Image (cartoon, grey):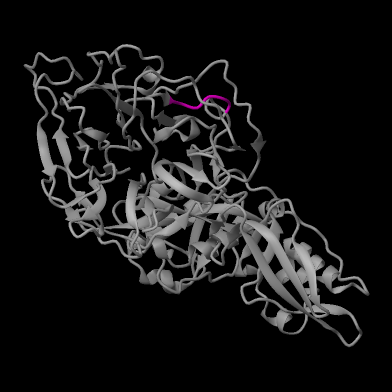
């Protein structure tokens, strides 16, 4: 007899047990790296001597690159190797080329030119955005030199975009990833955007404040806002820290904003500057005078005092398992070792689940578990089933599948075809991606209980189709798997613009992420700055589970055979579930899964090619699952 197939849908409400495994330690090599939210260590401070007398052109170039870690005093140390146009026009903030353990090669092209080449793992652009590069990527630069009147060589010409070239280890001692925060356009929630910013120079608090005052990043325009009017700036060009309080003195432009925008601006500064060493509170001044906000607790201790919340975290999970056409509510811990159908009685559950024929797959549910959506085998029809609370006189046990045929709340079969697995956002909005009747890429949404689909604007796809999507917990960003006409897939992030009712109207121009990926099959959000995918890098022989931090290198989980779906319950690495073609449901084991060090966002502190996976859970295939988020906006 064949084993019953099972569905697992992650929703909100019930506390989910962690899945751990005894006797299967994560024994894979571990690579340490800086992690967002970990304490910022003092920056590397190295004293560089000026170029030695008689240094050759290659030695001058090598010394210039090495001095790039010393950015104090307006990068005086590396500037000592420059002259002429290079001295006046070189911008160390133009970007960072990060190479691995092998130093760049330097070749003398002619007496006045040195060719610089390196294998590059990542770039940090002029805005501080981390851009991962495919394995084997190389960077070449031609460096022009000139002999001074005393016969000493100096660099005279650099490429326009030449900033710093640093090894990965030195880059992590000179820069660090920090969250900047923006105001959700749909709720009193802060939405993060991670940038790598220098640890030396003006000081971390001042650097963070300056970065926060800049415009909203292009990919989030329309999805988020900022409380700072255009051309806002620091009235005093540094942020002082006094007894744990960062004092930010702003120009009078902030007074042009409304009271709610001022609250938002303060919340942005508080959330962002909290990452600076020694900062516990933030005082906001305008031209030397304290900013006064009506009905605000003083002193302001947290963003909650200003009426804002962070991106949120799950308040517990519930899983919907499937055996044949029956659904049942359970928790994550109960998945381990299932060999019998899910229990009919679900203590504490107050929902009656519909019967859903096995032909409908890729089921998904909103956080409130008010409905179920799925697609048919042809991927041309999408159906929604309502989930009703049992009547007081009902004889059905709480959580027992209703003894009736499925009740279709809506059927969508005219708008398009080639539907991707459906997804829900935190507001209960159903998202569908596919192609329209003309064969063009399209994304549609349907509000709670709606019987019609509304098309969402998709600028910037350049002919790519949306193969899969998942909306972040804050509801303002969406992770996209884009498929080019050639069939090549890539991962991207985009902002979500909503109307006054909270319905999505536009997905912004995608921002590529996970540059090391060459194939992407499925995606899920692990936390607000990390996604996990089923995919492949060029160094991977087959598709596997990969963790993709939005500002760190992609790293691999232990390989499994034929993975088909990846699911997150919102608990970092320990919350990942991978489902294989054979129906096995796998959860991580090892230090990272069983209570090892994690950052405040729930992601891994250690970068590892592990951990290992637990033995298979015997409940069949997980077709779809969504990140669990609070039932109502925080």
- Residue 510, percent from left and from top: 39, 59
Q: Residue at x 25, y 15 (%)?
A: 347
Image quarter of the C terminus:
top left
Q: Is 198 left or right of 67, judged from the image as shown?
A: left
Q: Is 246 left or right of 30, judged from the image as shown?
A: left
- Residue 570, percent from left and from top: 41, 35
Res 564 visible: yes
Of 383 and 275, the residue lying toward us: 383
Q: Residue at x 62, y 68 (%)?
A: 93
User: Residue 170's quadrant in the figure?
Assistant: bottom right
Q: Is residue 145 above or below residue 450?
A: below
Residue pushed farthest left? Answer: 393
Image quarter of the N terminus:
top left
Of 99 and 583, the residue lying toward us: 583
- Residue 505, percent from left and from top: 24, 59
Q: Is 428 left or right of 247, judged from the image as shown?
A: left
Q: How many numbered tags mark residues here?
A: 0
145 in magenta: no
Of 532 and 441, the residue lying toward us: 441
Q: Give the dominant element type of the magenta stretch: helix, strand or loop.
A: loop
Residue pushed farthest bottom? Answer: 149
């Amino acid at each position: 007899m064949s084993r019953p197939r099972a569905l697992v849908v992650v929703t909100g409400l019930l506390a989910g047990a962690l899945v751990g495994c005894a006797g299967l330690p994560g024994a894979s090599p571990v690579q340490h790296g800086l992690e967002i939210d970990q304490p910022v260590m003092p920056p590397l401070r190295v004293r560089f001597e000026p170029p030695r007398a008689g240094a050759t052109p290659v030695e001058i170039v090598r010394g210039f690159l090495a001095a790039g870690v010393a950015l104090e005093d307006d990068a005086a140390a590396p500037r000592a190797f420059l002259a002429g146009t290079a001295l006046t026009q070189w911008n160390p903030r133009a970007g960072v080329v990060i190479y691995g353990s092998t130093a760049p090669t330097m070749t003398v092209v002619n007496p006045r030119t040195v060719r610089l080449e390196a294998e590059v793992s990542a770039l940090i652009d002029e805005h501080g955005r981390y851009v991962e590069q495919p394995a084997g990527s190389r960077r070449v630069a031609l460096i022009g030199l000139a002999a001074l009147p005393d016969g000493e060589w100096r660099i005279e010409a650099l490429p326009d975009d030449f900033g710093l070239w640093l090894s990965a280890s030195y880059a992590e001692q000179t820069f660090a990833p920090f969250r900047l925060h923006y105001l959700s356009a749909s709720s009193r929630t802060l939405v993060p955007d991670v940038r790598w910013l220098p640890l030396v120079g003006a000081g971390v608090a001042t650097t963070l404040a300056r970065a926060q005052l800049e415009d909203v990043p292009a990919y989030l325009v329309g999805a988020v806002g900022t409380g700072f009017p255009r051309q806002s700036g620091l009235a005093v060009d540094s942020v002082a820290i006094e007894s744990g309080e960062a004092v930010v003195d702003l120009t009078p432009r902030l007074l042009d904003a409304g009271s709610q925008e001022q609250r938002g601006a303060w919340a942005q500064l508080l959330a962002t500057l909290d990452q600076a060493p020694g900062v516990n509170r933030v005082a906001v001044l305008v031209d030397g005078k304290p900013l006064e906000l009506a009905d605000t607790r003083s002193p302001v201790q947290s963003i909650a005092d200003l009426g804002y919340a962070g991106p949120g975290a799950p308040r517990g999970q519930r899983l919907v398992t499937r055996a044949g056409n029956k659904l049942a509510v359970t928790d994550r811990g109960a998945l381990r070792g299932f060999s019998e159908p899910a229990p009919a009685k679900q203590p504490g559950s107050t929902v009656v689940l519909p019967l859903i024929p096995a032909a409908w797959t890729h089921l998904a549910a909103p956080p409130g578990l008010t409905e179920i959506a799925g697609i048919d085998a042809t991927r041309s029809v999408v159906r929604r089933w309502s989930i009703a609370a049992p009547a007081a006189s009902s004889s059905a046990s709480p959580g027992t599948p209703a003894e009736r045929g499925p009740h279709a709340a809506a059927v969508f079969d005219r708008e398009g075809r080639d539907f991707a697995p459906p997804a829900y956002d935190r507001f209960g909005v159903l998202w569908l991606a596919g192609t329209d009747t003309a064969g063009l890429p399209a994304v549609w949404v349907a509000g709670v209980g709606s019987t019609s689909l509304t098309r969402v604007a998709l600028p910037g796809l350049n002919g790519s189709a949306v193969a899969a999507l998942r909306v972040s917990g804050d509801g303002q960003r969406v992770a996209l798997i884009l498929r080019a006409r050639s069939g090549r897939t890539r991962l991207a992030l985009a902002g979500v613009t909503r109307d006054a009712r909270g319905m999505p109207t536009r997905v912004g121009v995608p921002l590529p992420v996970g540059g090391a990926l060459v194939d992407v099959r499925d995606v899920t959000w692990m936390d607000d700055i990390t996604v996990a995918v089923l995919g492949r890098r060029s160094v991977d022989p087959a598709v596997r589970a990969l963790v993709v931090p939005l500002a760190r290198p992609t790293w691999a989980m232990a390989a499994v055979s034929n993975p088909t779906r990846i699911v997150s319950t919102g608990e970092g690495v320990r919350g990942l579930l991978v489902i294989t073609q054979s129906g096995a449901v796998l959860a991580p084991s090892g230090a990272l899964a069983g209570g090892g060090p994690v950052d405040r966002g729930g992601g891994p502190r250690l970068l590892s090619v592990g951990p290992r996976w637990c033995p298979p859970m015997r409940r069949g295939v997980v077709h779809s699952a969504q990140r669990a988020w609070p039932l109502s906006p925080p």
